[in-house]
Image (spheres, helix red, strand yellow):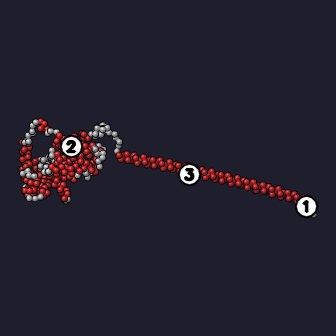
Amino acid sequence: MTDPSDAELLSRFRSGGACALERIFERYETPLFQFLVGILRDHHLAEDALQETFVRALERLDSVDPDHLRGWLFTVAYHQAMLSRRRKARLPSVHEHNGRVADPTPAPWLQAAEQDDARRLRELLEQLPASQREVIRQRIYEGKRFREIAAALDCPLNTALARMHEGLKRLRLLWEQNHARSACDEYPIQS
Amino acid sequence: MNTPSSHDLNVQAFLYASGELEETEAVCFERRLAEEQAAREALSQAVLLCQPLGSFTAAPDPGYRECVRRRLRPRPGMECGSGRPRVDRGHPVLWCLLGAAAVLLVLALERTSEHQRVQAQLHEMAQELVDLDIQVLDLKAEQLEQKLGHVEDELLETREHGDRRATQRHQDSPDKANPLKQ
C-alpha cells in the first residue's frame, strides 16, 4: 500500500481523522526539527518551536495548497524560529536570572556511556577512506574549523566539506549497523 | 547528481549549521532560508550530518505531539485554537453539488415553463385554425344555401313559365291539343 499524499492526509485531517495527524508528525517532524535546530542551535528551543509550528500551521490551512504542505510547514517553522530567537534575545537567560551557572559536567553514568560511544566511534572511523577519516578526525577530535582543515590538507574548502559529508554519511550507516548488532547481542530473540 | 548551485547551497548550509559562516554570510543565508525551500532542505540535511553520532538530537521528544493534539482539538462550537466561534458551513464539495443541482433545477423549470408556453401557443394557434375552419365552412354553407335558393327560384320560375305556356298553347289550338278527336 502506498503512502497517502499530503493532499489526502490534509483532507483526512480536516475531516477529523486522528491518524492523519499522526502521519503528518511522522512525515515532517524530523526534517522540521533538524531545520529548527540548525537555526536555533538549541534542542529545547527547537522542540518548543516545533510544537508552535505544527499548531499554527495546521490552524491556518484554509488558504494552503494541499500539495505544498511541506513548504508551508517549513515557512511557519522559519518564522517560529525567528520569533523564538528574538524572544531569547529580549529575555535574560534562566542561568543569569537565577544568579548561578549550571554545572557543565555530565552525570557519571552519562560520562561512562559517552566514553563507550567514543571508543566505538574511533573504531568505526578506522573503516573509512583516509581522506574522509582525516577531515572528520580534525573536525571532531581537534575541533578545527572547516576553513582551517582545508588549509591544513591543502585542498579547496568545498572538497573538505564534501569529504566530511560523505564520511559522516558512511560513518552514520556503520554506527547504526553496529548499534543494531549490539542490541541483538544484548537482547537475543527468544524462539 | 548535484548541480553547482545546489552544491554551493549544501556547502553554505553545512557551514551555517556548523557556525562557520561570517556574520554577513549568515545573514544572507538566513534571507535565503526565508524564501527558498531548497535552502531549508539543505540546512535540515546539514544538521543531520553535523550532529554527534549516537545522540538523540535528530528527533524531538515525542511528548510534544500530545501538546499539539490537545491544542488542535476542537472545542464545542469553537474552531481549533483560534478562539473564534465556528460556523459549520459544510464541505465545499457539498456546496458545489447543491449549486449544480440548483442550476439544473432552474434550467429544468425554465425548460418546463418554456415548454408550457410553447404548448399554450400551439393550442391557441390550433384553436384559431379551428375557428377559421368553422368560419370558412359557415361561409361556404351560406354561399351554398344562397346558390340553392337561386336554383330553386329559377326552377320554380321555369316550372311556372312551362305551365303558363302549356296553358296558353292549349287555349290557342284545342285540336292540336286533342289530336284523337279528328
**Which residue is rendered at x = 15% and y = 46% of the image?**
A41
How many other residues sit within 10 Å of disc 1, few (<14), some (14-19) or many (≥20)? Answer: few
Depth check: A21 or B37 in front? B37
Q: Are marks 1 and 3 in contact (CB under 8 Å)?
A: no
Dot 1 amino acid type = Ser
Between circles 2 and 3, the one closer to the viewer is 2
Q: Position of residue A16 (x, y in %)?
A: 29, 43
Q: Chain of mark 1?
A: B
Q: CA distance from mark 2 to mark 3?
A: 77 Å
Q: Earlier in the sequence, mark 1 or mark 3?
A: 3
Q: Chain of mark 2?
A: A
Q: Is residue B3 above or below residue B119?
A: below
Q: Chain of mark 3?
A: B
Q: Which mark is residue B122?
A: 3
Same chain for the residues at labels 2 and 3, yes or no? no
Dot 2 amino acid type = Leu
Depth check: B163 or A79 in front? A79
Helix, strand or loop for disc 2:
helix
How many other residues sit within 10 Å of disc 2, few (<14), some (14-19) or many (≥20)? Answer: few
Between circles 1 and 3, the one closer to the viewer is 3
Marks counted in the figure total 3
Q: Which mark is residue B173?
A: 1
Helix, strand or loop for disc 1:
loop
Q: Residue at label 2? A: A83
Q: CA distance from mark 1 to mark 2?
A: 151 Å
Q: Position of residue B160 (x, y in %)?
A: 82, 56
